[in-house]
Amino acid sequence: MSELAVAGAAANTAAQSPLSLGVHNHIKKTPRGKIKTAAKSKSNTVIQITVLVLLGLTVYGFLTFDYKNIDLATALASTLDNASTMFLQPRLSYNSFSGAMFALLITFSLGALATIFGAIIAFFGALLCAKNIANPLVATVVRSFVAFIRAVPTILWVLILTIAAGLGSVAAVAGLTFHSAGYLVKAYSESIEEVDNGVIEALKASGASYWQIVFQAILPASLSFMTAWTFLRFEINFSTAIAMGAAAGAGGIGFDLFMAGSFYFDLHELGFITYIVVIAVIVLEMFATKIKAKVR
Amino acid sequence: MLNKFSEKLKNKRASSKAEATQDTNVSQASKQSSNTKATQDAELTQDAKISKWQLDKSSVFIKRKRTFTLAFLGVAVLFAGSAIITNYNVIEGFTSIPKVIIWMVQNLVPNEKSWEHLPSILSKLAETALVAIAVTVCAALCSFFFSLLGTRTTKANPLVARVVRVIAAFFRNVPDVVWAILLLFSFGQNVLTGFFALFFATFGLLTRIFIETIDEVSSSCVEAMHATGATTLQTVFQGIVPSSMPSIVSWILYMIETNIRTSTLIGVLTATGIGYAFDTYYKRMDYASASLVVLSIVILVIAIELISNQIRKVIM
């Protein structure tokens, strides 16, 4: 009741003030009289709820994790000690430098093969599920199939394929290809959907066949986006290939990392190989940025 | 070009029609073929025109063709080189696909015995999901404060901004596998091994992304607020936070999805969470239970993707 009375009084004063031109009735104020700067909208409410839920899950997670009575301070201190050994005194003792470079080349090649296969498969996949040129029913089926492929982590693909296809580069490349193709189908189909509908319609009206539309309208218009996505995926595939080498024995520099860290327990070697990998990733990123700039 | 296209098409259609009607109606066929001859002649003159035009303004098409040929050759060389280096057998690569599918259909199906493992799989999955969420939220909080120092909009010290960017690049470029191996030395088989390994990688990536987002989204509103005399804290909380929040939340949701997959990988490496569950069944050759693990991950990831898409639709 009292709040209502206060609000009524506030409205009265607003109406009585000489400056009032009806604007005051539209400015929302907090109970303490401050002007509200943030408008209440559905979007803001959803953001707030999302953030609150995520924070709640984080707190719940920290409360329920099984820490196995670990002493966080000593563990962190010894990790810091190990990290300084690793990063400040890098040294190769089990691998030669040229051996490490060749292993890097193998990882690079695994990533390249998977990207090439993934890009080819994804191009046709994207044609089947881009909303502006595909049959809606086929598009839905392909989309769900691709979402399934993408949801399985790459490491599981590689491990599964290792049993079915045997240890070696075939399993690694196929496993990497699955996820790259799934990722690129989504990216490519989004770039195809951005192609101007007028161009496609004009070609259709002049009697162009499906493949003529694809190669004369869609490919030239979306090629720069597709190239940019493909290079981004190649960078991701390179780091995934490192991880596959370490976790699934797929060879390359990742396997050397695993051997140095978990087999020889040699922090110096781990540090040196890490530096090689970091430099390779940075060079690759610079190269990709240059090519992307050239394509546009 | 378009003219040439339709001309050629007409020509093709006319000739195919002519073939079809040849044995049924000879006179009509001869009419058609004379028709095609006429269009062929028309096309010849058209071709001559086009080639003349190309000579005048050759650069665009010839250049495009040259670029395509070069790109194609480059990819072919890259493919051949990579195949040789990795001992990749192309034929085996293709013939293994049907073999793999048959194997998966035969073995990767949950059977009755594997359903008994479901409670333990689900608890491991919940742990992995919570780790992924906790890591992403903690990394996002740290990254946000770091990115405030790193962006151009707040006009922080340029030296500090550069240092922040270099630190972020370092954390981003060291592979998460390396963090996992390093942390394994001191933390052993613990949730925290995966937590910190993921945290470092996520922190590096999100700092870079947040810096880009803030530079892109908030610069105009920050400039306006500076002009009205707002303090730095006011610009941060009244300008940067509200204007960049939708993209930040969207990126956080994306990172959670990615981190669930990555934490499976780190789980295989450090023997924790759902990755360890898969690895155990896999090494015991209990493929039915392993397939149950895969299915549960797929359902979780797709559910998170769907929820994220709904949230994105409202907030973006």
Image: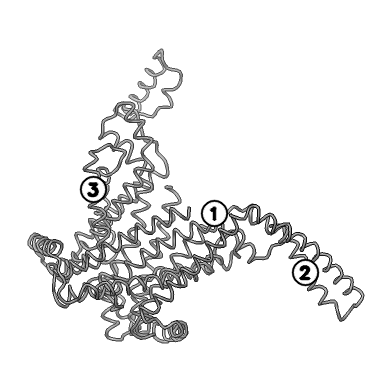
Near mark 2 (Cα within 10 A), the count class, few <14, some 14-19 or many ≥20, is few
Chain letter for the residue marked with disc 2 in the picture: B
Question: Given the current orientation, which residue lies at the most extreme right position?
Answer: B27
Front in this rendered view, residue A162 or B106: A162
Identified by mark 1, the residue type is Glu
Q: Work out whether B154 lies above or below A86.
A: above
Is residue A185 rendered to the left or right of residue B248?
right
Instruction: Give the numbered dot on residue B13.
Output: 2
Q: Tell me where residue B259 appears, x and y as whole percent.
A: 31, 63
Contact between marks 2 and 3 (CB within 8 A): the answer is no
Q: Tell me where residue B183 appears, x and y as whole percent.
A: 16, 66
Instruction: Give the numbered dot on residue A194.
Output: 1
Q: Are marks 1 and 2 on the same chain?
A: no
Front in this rendered view, residue A1 or B152: B152
Instruction: Give the numbered dot on residue A242.
Output: none
Which element is circle 2 on? helix
Name the N-terminal-most of marks 2 and 3: 2
Q: Which residue is mark 3?
A: B164
Residue at 33% over, 81% down: B289
